[in-house]
Amino acid sequence: MTTLEKDKQYLIQCYTTDDIVFTNGKGMYMYDEGGKKYLDFSGQFSACTLGHGNEELIEALKEQLEKLVSVTSCFATEERAALAEKMIEISPDGLDKVMFGCTGSDANEFALKVAKYYRGGGRVISFRRGFHGSTAGAAAATGKSEMIQENSGISELLPRGFVHSAPPYCYHCDFGKEPGTCGLQCLKYLEQTMLHEGGDRIAAVISEPIFAAGGVIVPPKGFWKGVRELCDKYGALLIFDEVVTGIGQTGAMFACQYEGVTPDILVTGKGLTSGYVPGSAILCRKEIGEAMGKISLHGHTHSCYPLTCRSALKNIEIIERENLVENSRVTGEYLHEKLLGLKEKYDVIKDVRGRGLLQGIEIEGNSSADKFVLGQELYETMLGNGLITELESRKNLENVVVVMHPALITTRENVDEAVEIIDKSLQSCIK
């Protein structure tokens, strides 16, 4: 029995599985069992900040394995203390307390619990098309209409008290407005939602600064400053979910820094450890963190795991030394320009958007192809041609977006190679 046959026979197939078995990776490339090379422009869900097989990071993890591995969050370690100090150093001013977790989902879960506890209850407002995880609270905050929201048999697992507002999605405006003349109607609707749905108290507003899984939705300028003002006006905490957008992916250490908006709670993960060890972090204002100090609210056996902390410390060290956040910004601008060139060439590309090395192209169909069929065909053709991307495409979401968030080590040559494959794939898909 082949590896793929074993996988299909024994593994619960919760995800759509492509018929590829990867055996190794190096830098920007992954290799299947037949030796075929693939350019990884997914970063494996935006986790592989340093790419595959970074020898310096691997060596640091070997050293940690020989020193200390399993320590619960009940005890301090030098790795935990050092990473806590580093996270405060690199985060926006005003975030002075940190907790570590295992995944983005559990970090968002903790952030929501913190907000509820600190505010003494209240509803949580998030946005349609936003994604915050697969655990109960994080899934309830998710507005992307995943299976857990749609299936009545399991949607009962979602907690109450979550309300979704209209997203700041200029290409697919819920109000039929045009950018520049809309008067930020989505922001006005958020205030209406806070007034009419908030009851006597709003615990928090949670959102990604850039909606990654919703199709790389970049809110218009001034939106987040307006949200910050509304949260202050109504006493709600602002939570930024930077699980995807954090640690340099958008060309800034954190995407919220583009507008100079500091949340009350910031969550990050994925690229925190470059994906070599699972890990996440939750940062918050000092008074919020100190309020949590006397209760046992949230934790996992591997929270604050020394191996996670060492991986994050070495990852951040390399990112800073190699100036990779700036590389993300500069190379991301080059990628954006090249994708705009494809938009000029192909009518089916209707929008190109993103910041840094988080970019998306929105696809519409033509007279001979449904856009959802075209999107799937394009994704599969690019994969067959050796380019790994992600496809956000579901009919109830209305959009078809090819999402790219490659490693921070991406070069202009990598961009040229990726765009050449996209171009070639489009040519073969468009009839």
Image (tube, rainbow, N blue to C red):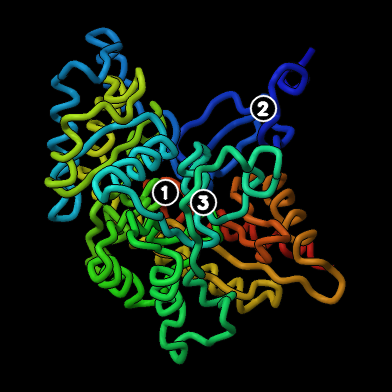
Foreground tag (2 vs 1):
1
In the image, residue 368 sits, relative to residue 154, either above or below, namely below
Where residue 142 is drawn, which disc sits there?
A: 3
Residue drawn at the location 27% of the way across and 48% of the way down: 120
Q: Position of residue 364 (x, y in %)?
A: 71, 71
**Which residue position is annotated with label 1?**
244
Marks 2/1: CA–CA distance: 25 Å
Query: Along the line of sight, which residue is nearer the eye, 46 or 214?
Result: 214
Foreground tag (3 vs 1):
3
Judge from the rendering whether residue 382 lies leftward or rightward of residue 134; answer left or right.
right
Judge from the rendering whether residue 137 lies leftward or rightward of residue 13; answer left or right.
left
- Check disc 2 and give the amino acid type: Val
Q: Position of residue 50 (x, y in %)?
A: 37, 39
Circle 2: is it few (<14), some (14-19), or many (20+) Cα within 10 Å? some
- Check disc 1 and give the amino acid type: Val
Query: Along the line of sight, which residue is nearer the eye, 192 or 272?
Result: 192
Foreground tag (2 vs 3):
3
Marks 2/3: CA–CA distance: 31 Å
Q: Position of residue 418 (x, y in %)?
A: 56, 55
Mark 2 and mark 1 in contact? Answer it, CB < 8 Å.
Answer: no
Residue 81 location, quadrant: top left
Where residue 329 is drawn, which disc sits there?
A: none
Residue 374, visible in the rendered structure? yes
In the image, residue 66 sits, relative to residue 98, either above or below, namely above
**Which residue position is annotated with label 2?**
21
Query: Along the line of sight, which residue is nearer the eye, 426 or 9?
Result: 9
Residue drawn at the location 47% of the way across and 72% of the way down: 168
Judge from the rendering whether residue 356 lies leftward or rightward of residue 262; answer left or right.
right
First of labels 2, 3 by sequence position: 2
Q: Quadrant of the N terminus?
A: top right
Circle 3: is it few (<14), some (14-19), or many (20+) Cα within 10 Å? many
